[in-house]
Image (cartoon, rainbow, N blue to C red):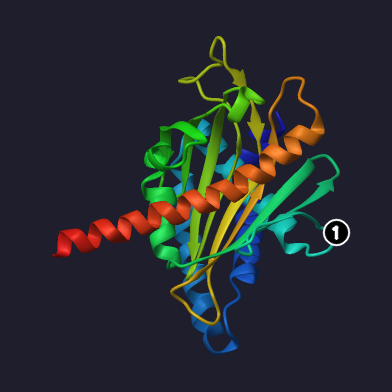
Amino acid sequence: MYLKTCLSLPGLRKNAMVAIHHELNRLAGPSPSNWISQVRRRSSLLSSRIREVEGYSEAEMSYVKQGEDALQKAISILSEQDGWTIETVAANGDKVLSKTLPDIGKVFKLEVMLEQHPDNLYEELVGNMEQMGDWNPNVKQVKILQKIGQDTMVTHEVSAETPGNVVGPRDFVSVRCAKRRGSTCFLAGMSTQHPKMPEQRGVVRAENGPTCIVMKPCAEDPNKTKFTWLLNIDLKGWIPKTIINRVLSQTQVDFANHLRQRMANNVSMEMAHAC
């Protein structure tokens, strides 16, 4: 009932979007010299976005709102710098931190520097999302169930079992919200339900969210990316927390390494085609 009420009030939708854009802009951090042009452009984008949303069905608007909510919550968490505890630091400097939040539970934050431009990473993670199973052995499949506009999609993901089958396969149905603000890219998500993908027999339906990947150019070298991944997952089942913590932090470290290899392979293929 609350969701339907929110969806039926354009003013509330607009206020929520304004708040999200404010947080995106603050996190992306435009310089004072281009502040006026940034504000004008973003105001125009917001107006177009609101007009676009007005044409959605109630079901589509529900997914849009869920995605926007996930993005807003994730950015709020990432904006708080205090209270994080180091889980692991890899030899190459990749770092996973964690903190426990009321009503959400434990969240993990991966912080790495990637030798790629944010645009290339965004294209791989958003544009080629369904190919993730080709290069990430922790993922069996990603399938897009529905797209709503340019920013929102509903996906079904199936994870692989961990080594030794400590944690068996899980599947997720998620709403994802992808946005770009200037040179900074965001990909947020959270669990949802979709008529095309009810719970599957023999597979544990896990839950996630809020989650968010933020890709921002390195200040010293814009062709490198400061890559941050906020992860919050409930794997379900009777798994000790110590194992869950180890599995999730290792999953994030592994993801960064697999993504590096994928991007390096992409560069090699482009060079080979150019010859």
Indicate the position of residue 227 as horizontal and vertical percent values: 56, 61
User: Which of the 4 image quadrants contains residue 116?
Assistant: bottom left
| Residue furthest bottom as drawn | 33
Q: Is residue 86 above or below residue 233?
A: below
Asked if 227 appears above or below 145 in the picture, the reply is below
Coordinates of residue 32 in the picture (x, y in percent): 59, 87
In the figure, 219 relative to 71: above or below?
below
Q: What quarter of the picture does the C terminus occupy?
A: bottom left
Residue in the picture at 33% in, 54% down? 265
Q: Position of residue 103 (x, y in %)?
A: 83, 39
Neighbourhood count class around disc 1 (C-alpha, 10 Å): few under 14, some 14–19, many 20 upward: few
> In the current view of this chain or complex, which residue is farthest to the top?
201
- Quadrant assignment for the N terminus: top right
Q: Is residue 88 left or right of residue 172?
A: right
Nearer the observer, 175 or 106: 106
Q: Could you say which quadrant of the image residue 96 lies in?
A: bottom right
Tally the numbered discs. 1
Nearer to the camera, 110 or 75: 110
Tag 1: amino acid: Gly
Can residue 31 be seen at all in this image of the molecule? yes
- When the figure is inspected, residue 92 is found, relative to residue 236, above or below; the finding is below
Query: Between residues 214 and 197, which one lies in front from this camera angle?
Result: 214
Residue at x-position 41% and y-position 45%: 149
Residue on which disc 1 sits: 83
- The structure residue drawn at horizontal position 46% and vertical position 64%, both measured from the top left corner, is 45
Closer-to-camera residue (202/146): 202
